[in-house]
Amino acid sequence: MAESRADVLATGRRLLRRRGRGLKPGGGLRGRLLAYLAILGPGMIAASAGNDAGGIATFAAVGAEQSYRLLWILIPITISLGLVQEMCARMGAVTGKGLADLIRERFGVRWTAFIMLALLIANAGVTVSEFVGIAAATELFGVPRFVSVPLSAIAIWWLVVKSSYQRVERVFLLMSLVFLGYIVSAFLAKPDWSAVAVSLVKPSFSFEYAYLFTLVAVVGTTISPYMQVYIQSSVVEKGVTLEDYGRTRKDVWVGTTLAILVVFFIVVSTAATLNKHGIHIESAADAARALEPFAGPYAEKLFAIGLFGASMLAAGVLPLATAYSISEALGFEKGVSRSFREAPIFLGVFTFLITVGAAIAVIPGLPLIRVLLVTQVINGLLLPIILFAILKLVNDRELMGARVNGRVYNLGAWFTAITVTLISLLFILVTLFPRLFK
Amino acid sequence: MLYLSQVLGRPIRDLEGERVATVRDVIVRLGEDDHPPVTGLVARFGRREFFLSRWRITELNEQGARLNSDKLNLRPFVRRDGEVLLARDVLDKQLIDVDGKRVVRVNDVQLIEAAGELRVTGADVSLQGLYRRLAPGGFFGTRKPVEVLDWADVGYLATDAATVQLKSSSGKLARLHPVEIARLAEALSYQHGFEVVQSLDDETAAETLEEMPAERQARILGNMNEERAADILEWMSPDEAADVLGDLPEEKAEELLGLMEDEEQADVAELLPYEDDTAGGLMTTEFVTLPHQLTVGEALARLREMAETPNMIYYLYVVEAESSWKLVGVIALRSLILADPAMPLAEVMRTEFQRAHPDEAAGEVAQRIAEYNLLALPVMDESGDILGIITVDDAMEILLPKDWRQRLPRLFA
């Protein structure tokens, strides 16, 4: 033998050390940055939570109808959203399983069926809202909805099932960044910042139907059930473990804060532009006007681009994510590369959601903004079901070991769940018995 | 034939027919048996759960259980080694079906009485089972047949209750091709996938790991006991082992390298200097060399006598002399077999052949392999010595688009 074992070992050690110091391509600082970005996912996903059609409509409506009156809810909702998302991310890191899996394994078939049904309805609503968003966006360009909606539906279906959806994802993502324009708009519209500051901390409450409707919509669109399932799946798929969980947790909170920050600016800019002039939001064009301080005459077109991108993105991801959850929980075959015979339920749910979404969005004369708000209200009403499931799981010591909720954390989380439930119940009461609190 | 869902929650009656408790769970002893026997029930009375040995039960069916004596031991139930609770630990969990080569979820458990003993015979993974759980009264019906997976075909039970040895059968799993085992392990959660790999013998574990993405390989090996990890690394082909070591944290990688046996350690160390994205990073050192003085017959005899034949023997690399690495020609196994045994290798071999330098870009070399329809390509240094070969399967991995394995589209991938 030319070299002794000790020599070989020494050489090997030296070479490993060289590799570790990142002398391979993409190593060093760049490599570490790439590694960080790879784990960055879940938080940024959270950040995009408010940016879909339903979200934009809800917050634009909040600003236009209620001016700054609902701003106080943003801070509590940031905390609530952060708590819920962090719990789901933590469950994903500790158990390595998705939310639907955990529900099936801990709660059994009956509860799973019930919760999956709730999820299906809520997500169907959100899918409808995405196609409505597509309709509204394309109509701003003069393309009628009975042309754009079916075409987009077919395109999305085909891209996801037959082709590579990932390639177009990035394009849509970039398009949706337009909504950051609301931040600039908010400053350019010169709102009364002292009034804004006061409203941020001064709670106001009302038993009026309109107020409660908006409140439930706001809750439903920020803490949407599908987002929690998605964030847990995302954490599991990225293979985040307890060791690198600290980074993920920071990232979830950062993402949440960023998301609500954008919401804040949307509300302020619509309040400062629309509410000030007494304009109500009845169509997408109205919501676009709040971008005028920023984009002038291009406001409408820019808004349309952003809305189209965000809606197309969600319209592809959401039905697919729902199909995955349901198939995973109930043990059906899944996978986009399967045929209808091999994975009937999976492809069936996916196709069903896209069809229903498109079918409803095509209805002529549909009050688009109204529909968008209603879908978020559905989200909000079904949210307690998911929240209680999450709470039960995250406090299960057998499942989470030492990583169950701490006492203070639990206080915040339970408070969120109970408050959301109360608001939803209140809303249902007031809808059924309008004279109750008059 | 009995299903678990038909028994759970049913009353337990005494000799007089009076209800004394409810069936909470069924205890089963896992082990060597293909069809594990039921060893007892967990009964619930008020708030208490206690153990009922099967010897105390005369019958068990959809109506419930009947005791055969009036004495009841109310000592609280405590789990023993090797025992598993069907409702708590098996129902709704995933398992690996070795026959169907898939991961399925247990919707119900089938129990059959044979020779006076109640045994677990299968897992119901069908829609029927799901409906039965939703409404035991048979409210939902479907004409689809029940699909029961024979428990003998269970390769691994993804539960947290029992030890790895009990819930996995490495013998059954080894029936599958390593590609299949890898795919199934990846379909389970990380922890369960890790246990599946752990339960395999070293050689199969190595072959299975090679079919997984590099980061996952590194994580699994990193979490294993070091001696075992080193043993598995020895079984892996040196280029794969070098890749994994490169993905592990430094100290761990050095430790594992240090634990490896001389020969394999040297093989791996040889490949460490090369960057990932080059021909050197892609090549393996497992290939066959033959001195060009041999005849065809002598070459074939030598192949048969080799203690360990590498996977790639379809091309044989002809070198200048016995202990030289200077490459002078390449022979396809096909040519070798068809040629006259008396002919010297020099006359059968090809002296013109495609080659690569270790610093060449991996993508370009892979393209060349595809273009020339090669099974492998030798990597040579400036002085003409052969350093390693790049096989077509490694080239394919580079050439195939990254998203050929479709999953949930990610917003920020």
Image: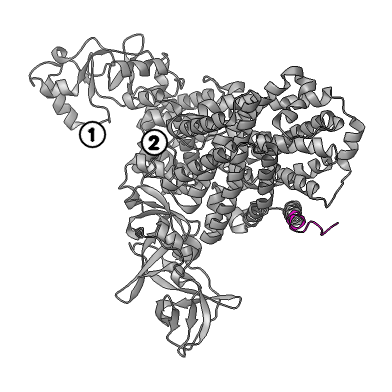
Q: Would residue A382 appear left or right of A106 to someone viewing this image?
A: right
Along the line of sight, the residue nearer the viewer: B214 or A200: A200
Q: Amino acid at mark 1?
A: Ala
* Lower sequence index among marks 2 and 1: 2
- Residue B373 seen in the figure: yes
Structural distance between the alpha carbons of marks 2 and 1: 25 Å
- Residue A240 seen in the figure: no
Labels 2 and 1 share a subunit: yes
Along the line of sight, the residue nearer the viewer: B406 or B194: B406
In the image, the segment drawn in magenta is A427-438
Residue A34 is situated, as x and y percent measured from the top left of the image, at 59, 26
Residue B344 is situated, as x and y percent measured from the top left of the image, at 12, 15
* Quadrant into which the N terminus of chain B falls: bottom left
Q: Quadrant of residue B55?
A: bottom left
**Which label is found at residue B307?**
1
Q: Quadrant of residue A163?
A: top left
Question: Is residue B9 part of the magenta span, yes or no?
Answer: no
Q: Quadrant of residue B142?
A: bottom left
Looking at the image, residue A20 lies above or below residue A118: above
Residue B78 is situated, as x and y percent measured from the top left of the image, at 53, 71
Which residue is rendered at x = 58% and y = 41% of the image?
A360
Q: Would residue B219 appear left or right of B313 to someone viewing this image?
A: right
Q: Which residue is mark 2?
A: B211
Q: Would residue B229 appear left or right of B409 to someone viewing this image?
A: left
Q: How is the image coloured?
A: one colour
Which residue is rendered at x = 46% and y = 22% of the image?
B276
- Chain under numbered label 2: B
Crowding near pointer 1: few (<14 within 10 Å), some, many (20+)?
few
